[in-house]
Image: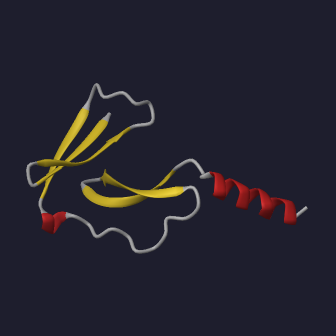
Amino acid sequence: MELIIVKDGHVYARARDADNTASEYSLITVQDSEMPEYPRASAGVGKYYDLDYVEGILSWVAKDRPLTTKERIEQLAADVETI
């Protein structure tokens, strides 16, 4: 399933389910006034914000992402301190 968000006649964002199949898609047209404001808070380590359309509401949702090398080193250092 692929979600395609169209704003002002242009593709604003695309998102695919984890299985990466695009056999089905949802096309959503939004206006500037309908775009939710990007969150000011940090999504947290290993997270990022992505547009999602849940139960008819377009919103920014924290999603998982791979840790950067720096974040993995920091996490390992924190784990070692607790031993």
Which residue lies most toward the bottom here? Answer: 40
Percent x, y of residue 16: 36, 38
Percent x, y of residue 80: 85, 60
Q: Is residue 39 above or below residue 17?
A: below
Of residue 69 and residue 13, the one placed in the foreground of this image is 69
Would you identify the image quadrant in which residue 71 lies?
Answer: bottom right
Q: Residue at x 40, y 30 (%)?
A: 20
Percent x, y of residue 9: 8, 49
**Position of residue 43 in the picture relative to residue 35 (left or right):** right
Q: Is residue 67 above or below residue 43?
A: above
Which residue lies most toward the left here? Answer: 9
Would you identify the image quadrant in which residue 7 lies?
Answer: bottom left
Q: Residue at x 86, y 66 (%)?
A: 81
Q: Residue at x 17, y 64 (%)?
A: 34
Which residue lies most toward the right here? Answer: 83
Percent x, y of residue 39: 38, 70
Q: Which quarter of the rendered picture does the N terminus lie within?
A: top left
